[in-house]
Amino acid sequence: MTAGSLPAAPGGVNAPRRRSVDLDDDKIATRELRLPPSFAAKGDTVVVRLLTPLAAWAALWSFAAFRLDPSAAAEGRFLASLAGGVLLCAALASRRPFQGLAAGAVLAVAAGWMLPWGPVRGSALVLVLVGTLAWVLAERWRTEGLSLEWRWALPAGIGIQLLLHAELLLPDSFGPRALVTLLVLPAVGTAAALWAARDRDPRVVGAAVGAGLVLAQGWSLLLTLGLLAWVCGEGLRRRNPWPALLLGLLGGGALVAGWEPREAMLVTAIAVVAWWSAADSAAEAARPRWLLPAGASLLLLLVLGLVPALGARPWPLAFAYLALVPLVLPWLLVAAPSRAMLVALAALAALRVLPGDGVLAPIVATASLTLPAEGQGAWLERRWLALLVGLTVVAGAYPWLREPAATLALDLLGIGSGWISALGVVAASALLVFLSHRGWRVTGAAAAGLALLAAVHLPSSGPDLLPAADALLNAKHPNWGTDLEPRSAAALVVDSTLAFGAALPEGTPVATVRCFHDDGSRSEWSLEARRGTGEWAARRSDVRAAAGAPPRAFSVGVSPDGRFLGQRYRALFEIEDRRPVRRVSVLRRPDLPPEVQLSLLRVELRP
Amino acid sequence: MRSREARSDALAVVRTLAEVLFAASASLALAFRTSPSKLAPAAADPLRSTLVVVPIVALALVWIDRACAARGGRRLAPALRRAHLAAMLGLSVLTLGRGALGLELSAPVVAAGWALLLAHRVYHQTLTLRPLLGRRLPERPSTLFFFLPLVVYLAITPWMSAQRPPDGDEPYYLLLAHSLSHDLDADLANNYAEEDWRTFMDRPIAPQPGDPTGPDGEVYSRHNEMLPLLLAPGYRLAGRSGAVMTLAAMAALLAWLFLRLGRSYFPDSPGAVLLATSLVAFAPPLLLYAVEIWTEVPGAVLATIALDRALVLRRREPRRWEVLLGIGLPVALLPLLKLRFVLIGLPILVLAWWRAPRARRQLVALGVILALLGLGFLVSNQVRFGNPLKMHSSEELDLAHHSLGEFARGGVGLFFDSAFGLFAVAPLWLVVLPGLAWVATRRQTLLADLGLLSLPYLALLAPRGEWYGGWSPPFRYGLVLLPLLGLLAVPAFEHRRSRGARALLSALALVTLVLTLAWVAVPGWTFAFADGKTYLLDHLSRITGSDVVRIFPSTIRPRLATWLWPPLLAALLIAGWWWPRSRRGRRSLGPPRATGTALLLAGAALIPLAGARWPSHVIEIEDAQVGHYGGHLHPSRWTVDRARYRGGWVLRPGESATLPVVAGGDRVAVTIHAQWVSNGGEVLLELRRGEHLLATWRPQEERRWLVHETEPMPWTPGEPLVLALRAVEPGTKPTAAAPSGLVIDRVELSWSAEVSSERADP
């Protein structure tokens, strides 16, 4: 029997879990200490459900409306809208508006009120919102079992989308495309997930969609298309035309709108291959024989055609991603090798040629859908996915802080772009898979040990070398420097932004960064436009129209007028042999246009 | 069979050893990872010590969970345990990786995250412990009710201690403990000379005013030696940390004793008593004092032991040793901790005599012994320090020279003051109001007992100028009464199922949770200055530019809110608690918890609105929302017993202050309370509406508080009131080093509507 055809038997994964158990012989229930469930059927209306989110929105908005600092006020209004929207979705998705929702709302308001404005406040508030939404879903799972249903999956999907595409709430980004992103993509994606869950273990679907959502930072077009394409196979087997129709509409619309057409085609091809490779023997007979050669040929053509145009990621990094994507060893153990290799190769090809981390999402999601629900590898698979999801959620808690969540997860794990790092991850995976045969206690202990090792090797931060105010380098005052007590350092970190620098071509040197060492030598690097630094207003509509897509930011914050997200950039320069540093200086290049200004926001020597 | 058991035991030992080994290695690894030698010294991670204790605390909580199950309780759900483990890993990553995330300022936020996780664990663990109490409270509750609070206190100690060096009287207690443990004497002269305070703080300390001295240059502390004696063993072993851990153990013991005390009044309400115990143990103020060095926690422990034993005498035949050790010893030790505790100890003796007729003979004998001991104590003080009361005087006991207003201010302030009151530091304590109403309406013995035990102490304390404690977390002087207040919470928790009670409990619990997280994350916020404000309210006022402080009560700076809030809250709580259960056909107000939370948040939304819309009547010029362009605070922030002074702001010629004003009419009369300090040359105060000059005032009398009132003047909404000082004769040289100045205490605004057709001039 396959996982997909498991009946909803008592005690099975689909069965609702019991809410409480008898405690001991004298029947003293700890429930006595709990307040009775407040949301019994009576009185649990939509209006009541809306009360807490609306009140939280009002509290945050009221506080923002009366702030003196316009920048803080703009950020406050933005966070109020975000918190209100996400809490509203959480209230609608919850089984009953329970304690977790109330606690989340109050903690969100407290974070909005008490913390200083800026990344810290945004991060804390978004972490609270993420936790609240997760709590709501976990509570539903605990009480009812994991059964995907429209009535909670859609609000949950929109809530996640709001969290991860918060920028769309700002005036400069809001429009028809934003509405499609916020509402249509979650709706179609949820439909695809529900279709996929009809024949599969909900845990597999939930893990697959969850990983995809985190990696794509919400419902992206690629993720939605990938899932739809995967579901199309199921639809063909069941003679259900709706997935294909939706795929055609969405894909066609995207092509007409010029919305990532090449990537969309490639993802669709990979999804078809993944569906063909699915560990679902019941569906095997229904698979058209021509589908695999067709998909593989299309894939090959696309990869060959795209390599000259894109070729975005070096091979070691692609392998590292592949290890991060839980495909390599756990998956190989549980899937038929030929199919596993096929999906892995397709994913590797995509990772090699497609830029951006968004492409990982459909690959992870569709590949994860091919996994069986039970077996040695499945246990490890889900936990590996959970670790991945956890890391990326923590990293992306301030979603506009760092766009490439997957890259950040790699950074947090201390995985660089070299072969050694990639092989290290593969070896760790192999170890865990090997130990998984010894039972979950041994595996858990090994995983805890590995997590501890990873935690110990996380990069440290050093103190900020700048004085209290930021340093502004312009044509009149082009130099900044500071003398230090000599100290060993592994790297120099420079956070900065440019003003009036949007027109500078990528790679234009804008400043020279120097470290003077104790032994008289010095290290020197160049800070380059659109790489280590860039225009702060790169996302403003007029700048975007003139200068093109904004470069990747280290973090962002709401602009003082509250219309767009300003960008902040980080450059990291490694110091050879950790030589002691006694002076750090930054010199604006004299050949820059005179109006270009460089703001230094943080200069840090990493120990 | 036996071999299987032996194998199982051996496996358990191996598992325990493995867990200890793993926790220790994890702690060591984290200690190494965050060691200051690896980072730049200035970048030593403030969360380092917290990270180091996390594996140990986690292991202790796991053991408590297992022990609970082994003793008949319930284990935490596996999903919950996994969720806690995942959250712990996530927080560890966030703690260690926050630098890489670019969140350098977030240490208190991360600390709050850890505290939230701990709170969640403790909440669920407390529920699992409930079966251990059975249907009737046991005579001796399980020790897990001691260990759980202890683990909580030890978990928060590293962060809270690292955030704040010893303050107030704490360093003096520690120095005395140092002297007792290292020199085996109470003479501090050598300890001051050798700067022994460097072992626990960086800021130098000197003998306090009122410290007794000896004929050969000895310097004694004005504080009693009882608390330092208690701390000395721990201090000798682990310095300040050892002393703090000793007091944490005392606080945990207090929680356990409270649970046992509950049996004397509510033996058949174990659930409600457990909730009240949680309130006592895990909510401020005990949570804050568990990691501080004050006499209050040991005082409360001794008082609770004595009270518990006294109440036990009601139930069974008295035993001589029990009377002597259980009541006599704690009562004898109480004044040795702090002299004022004698007003707690004596009423306990009286209560025992009153409630236990069978033990009266033993109690009379005990009273004689205690009287002789007390006499000896007074004589000893007279011989050593020349004063039987050491640093106190008998006049302090004379209640007649205090006005009723002073009693009211201290009494109300102890509970309702926004900076120092019990209900402000943890609003969940407001449940004692419906509890008190319940006890009063049923004329329970508890009410009489509470009156007897607390009124003498409160009568002494409330009218004191320094009723608020002074440079300590809130409710210091009241902490010794905390177990008694906790008893009042029991009937409220017992009747918590009405809709109103559920709504109120939800709102109060949530706001208490948020405040507790804030106090733990930023312990300094609990050390308010006695100026009528708090850090949080100042923060709100500063960033909104409106006077938010005036909405909340303060008895240090009495205002309308001071006298409005207590009756309003009492009425709301008492009426709301007995809200009728929903009946068929009646319109439901919706689920109460959601309603309570929504009302709480809606109330929060009204605070900035009220600050910005409520007409200004009194503006304290030193407040955060006032823009100061020169000048300084008066008296200076660190003035001893500062509450005795009229706080104000000093303006010197050329300096000004901009006061945000919410207009309450078209015309305003301004009254200024100020004092002119002349050092040569007269000054002129200009009152402006924005840029427009409204009036001037030239003070005539020096060094005296003056009140100047202007005529009603037209006012334009939205404009600030500007007070600018200038010299009358700019060329006049000051006779002293400092120029002349005007100390402005407050500005009062009287609004009136326009009576004629004339409009405010532009």
Image: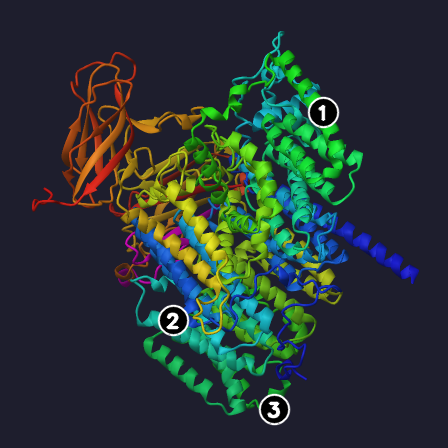
- The residue stretch that appears in magenta: A545-574
Number of the label disc, if any, that sits on residue B484: none
Quadrant of the image occupied by residue A444: bottom right
What residue is shown with label 2?
A181
- Tell me, yes or no, whether dots 3 and 1 are on the same chain: no
> Could you tell which of marks 2 and 3 lies nearer the N-terminus?
2
Q: Chain of mark 2?
A: A
Please give the label number shown on residue B368: 1
Residue B759 visible? The answer is yes
Amino acid residing under circle 3: Ala
Front position in the image: B337 or B229: B337
Q: Is residue B695 left or right of residue B235?
A: left
Which of the chains bears the disc numbered 1?
B
Residue A354 in view in this figure: no
Q: Which residue is mark 3?
A: A285
The image shows residue B126, relative to residue B662, as above or below, that is below
The image shows residue B438 at horizontal and vertical percentages of 55, 52
**Of the pair B353 and B170, the residue shown nearer to us:** B353
The location of residue B364, given as percent across then percent down, is: 72, 29
- The three-letter code of the residue at mark 1 reads Val
| For residue B137, above or below residue B309 | below
Q: Residues within 10 Å of mark 3 (few under 14, many from 20)?
A: few
